[in-house]
Image (cartoon, coloured by chain):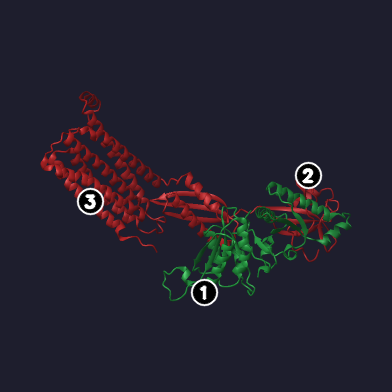
Chain colours: A red, B green
Amino acid sequence: MKTRPRWLSPYLVMGVVLAMYALKVGLKLWIGARINSPTITGDGSHNIADIFEAVAVLIVVIVANLPPDERYPFGRKGLESIARVVIGAGLLATALHFAASSVMGMLGHWPEADQAVRSFAPFGLPRPAPLHMGPDVLWWVIAVTFGSAILSFAVSWYEIRAGKVNGHASMVADGQETRSDGLIEATIFVGICAEYAFNAAWIEYPLGMGVAFLVARTGRELFSEGLAGLLQRSLGPEVEKAIREVCLATHGVREVEQVKTFRVGSAAVCILKILTDAPAGSHDDVKKALKKRLAVRLAELGIEDAEYHLRFSRLPPVDARVAYAAVTDGRTIAVAPDLETATHFIVVDLKNGGVKRWTLEELPGACEGRLSDWLAAKRITKLYVFGDRPATMLGPVQISGVPSYALDTLGLNDPPPII
Amino acid sequence: MRQVHVRYGVSPRAQMELGFAIDLARRLSSHLFVWTEEDRAARDLLKTVGIPEAAARESAHVSDRVRLRILQMEARLTPTFCQGDPAQAVHDPNAIVVGAEDAKRRSVASAVAAMGEPAIGARGAAEICLPFANGESARHAARTAIPLASALGMPLLFYHATWREEGLPSDAPAERHMTDEAFEVFELLCALADKARVRHRTVVETASTIVEGTVRAALNEHCALIALARGRHVGRGSYVDQILERSVIPVLVAGRSMA
C-alpha cells in the first residue's frame, strides 16, 4: 500500500498553521498598536478568528477520518462540506469588508464624495486612519507585513497540498483562505510602503479592490462547493457523460440505466446501474475493469478520490411466442411454404429473440376456419412460412416469410425423437 | 487473401455474427462465405409436397438478405453461399470462421467467438491480447494473431500470468518471477511481431489464475480481441474453453493447422 510522507500528515500541517497564526497575531497586534495602524491591528484581530477556524478544521479532520460504519456508510466526510460553507461565507464577508474599506479609502481623497456617501450610510462604513510611522519601526513594519504575506503563501501551499493528498476538503478550503490572507497582507504591505515612501497611500485602495475581488471569488467557490456537497448535487452533466462513455466502451456493458453522482466531502460517489448480458461469472471482471477505467477517466477530469457503487442487472427478457407452419412425414420436419401445405405448427417460445423452447403440434382439425382464434388462444403473435412474402394479417396474427425451411438455420435445434 | 466464413441464421445472435463477419471481411479485404445448413431430408420432404425447388428458393432468399445487410453496412463484398458445416468443410488454415460454437471445436480454420459484439474494436478498443506461458500454444496463436493484427493495423498486448517464485523479495517486479521457458516464448513472440512490424507491449503479473488474469487484463487494458490456441496435449479444462465461458471480449481460437 502506498504510504503518504509524514510531512504531509494533516495533524502536523494543522499544527504548523496554528503556530503561524499565533505568531502573526502577536506581531501584528504589537506593531499595529505601535504605529497606530488600524489595518494591521484589524488584520491581527482577523487572524485570531483564523486560529479558531484552524482548530475547527482540525476537529473536522479528526472526525472525517473516522472509518465508515453501519450508521454512517459513506463515512463522516460530509462534515468537510459544512467547513467549506462556513469558510466560504467568512471569506465573502472578509472580501466585502475589504472592498468597503478600499472604496472609502479612495473616497477619502474627495471629501465631498466621501461626505455624500456617508450621509446615505452613516453606520458601518470603515474610516481609514492616518498612519503614525517613523524610522525606528519601519523595518519592523516591513518585516511583519511582508513576512506575514510570504508565510501565508508558503503555509497555504503546504496546507492545500496536504489537504489534496489526504482528501480533506476542509484543509484545502482553509489553505485557500490562508492564501487570501496572504493577498490582503501583501496589499497592506504595498499600501504602507507607498504611504511612507511617496505619501501615496491611495495605491493601496485600487489594489485592495482587486484583492477583494479575488477573495470574494475564492469565497464564492468554497461556499458553492460546500453547499453542493451538503445538498448532494450531482458532479455535473460533463462528468456523468464521461462516466457513461467509459461504461459503454467497456465490453460486457449493454446499457447504463442509471448514473447518480454526488460528493461526500472531497470524495466523489458514483452509483451506477449497469445492464449486461455477460455471463454472471464475468460480472466481477467487468466491475473491476470498470472501476479501474472510471478512476483514470475521473482523474483526468480532476476528481482524484471517488467511490463506486456498481449494480449489475440482466437485460430485461423480452418473451414472445411465435409459430412456424410445418410439414412432416413422421421422420423429418420442414417449414411449409404456405398454410395449405402445412400439417403441423412449430410453436416456439422466444427469449430475447433466441429459441427457449419449441414443440411440434398437429394442425387443429376442429377449428377449421377459426385458425386465427386457435393461434390467438395459444398467445402466438407471429406465424412464419418458408419464402419471401410481404407481411399479412390473419386476425390478430401477423404472417411473414422466413428465408429457410431447415430447422437448424432457424435455431430450432434438437428436434424431438418421436415426431 | 484470408477467407471469412459465417453461418447464416435468423436468431439475433446469428445476425450479430453475420454483421461481425461482414465487418471483418471488409477490414481484411477478404472473401466472405455464408453457410446454410444442408438439410437434405427436409428438402426431399418438400419435394414430396410439390415444392421441388426449395433449395434454390432458400438460397435466393438467404442471398437477398445477406446482400441487403452488406449494402446496409456499405461493405462492398461479393459473398459466396455454401451449404454444410464450415467447421468441417473449411480446410484453409488462413481462414476465419465467425461463430461461438465453432470456437469450441478443434477445426482446421481459426474461429472467432464474437461474444455479442458487432465488430472487433467496436467499443474503441485497439489492441489484440495474446496471452503466453511457457508452452507451444502462444506460438500457434501468434501465427494467426500477428498477421491479423498487421492486417487490421492493431497493436499486440503480450500477457503473461506467472506463479510467484519463492525466495524473491515481495516487491520484485513480476518479470523476475517468469521462468526461462516463458522468457524464450516471449522473445520469440517479440521477434515475430517485430518481423511483421506490429507494435507490441507486454503486461506480466502474478495473477491468481491464468483465466481470471487473462480476462481481467484484457478488460483493464481495453483490448479488442483475445487470441488463443488450444494445446495439443490438453484434455479436460482447457484454458481456451474456460476463457470462452468467461470472456466478454471477442475470442479468436487459432485453427488446428496452426499447431
Looking at the image, residue A299 sits to the left or right of residue A214; the answer is right
Looking at the image, residue B247 sits to the left or right of residue A89; the answer is right
Task: Tell me the distance, in whole angstroms, between the alpha carbons under discs 1 and 2.
Answer: 69 Å
Task: Tell me the distance, in whole angstroms, between the alpha carbons under discs 3 and 1.
Answer: 60 Å
- Is disc 1 in the same subunit as disc 2? no
Q: Is residue A40 above or below residue A7?
A: above
Chain under numbered label 2? A
Mark 3 residue element: helix
Image point 18% across, 45% down: which residue?
A144
Q: Who comes first in sequence, dot 3 or dot 2?
A: 3
Image point 71% across, 51% down: which residue?
B77
Disc ID at residue B180: 1
Chain under numbered label 3? A
Image quadrant in which the C terminus of chain A is located: bottom right
Within 10 Å of the Cα at label 3, are there few (<14), some (14-19), or many (20+) other Cα atoms? some
Name the image quarter holding residue B152. bottom right
Name the image quarter holding residue B98. bottom right
Image point 31% across, 46% down: which residue?
A176
Image point 60% across, 67% down: which residue?
B242
The kind of residue on which mark 1 rests is: Asp
> Where in the figure is residue A84, as x and y percent of width and height?
34, 46
Residue under numbered circle 2: A392
Residue under numbered circle 3: A20
Q: Residue furthest bottom?
A: B167
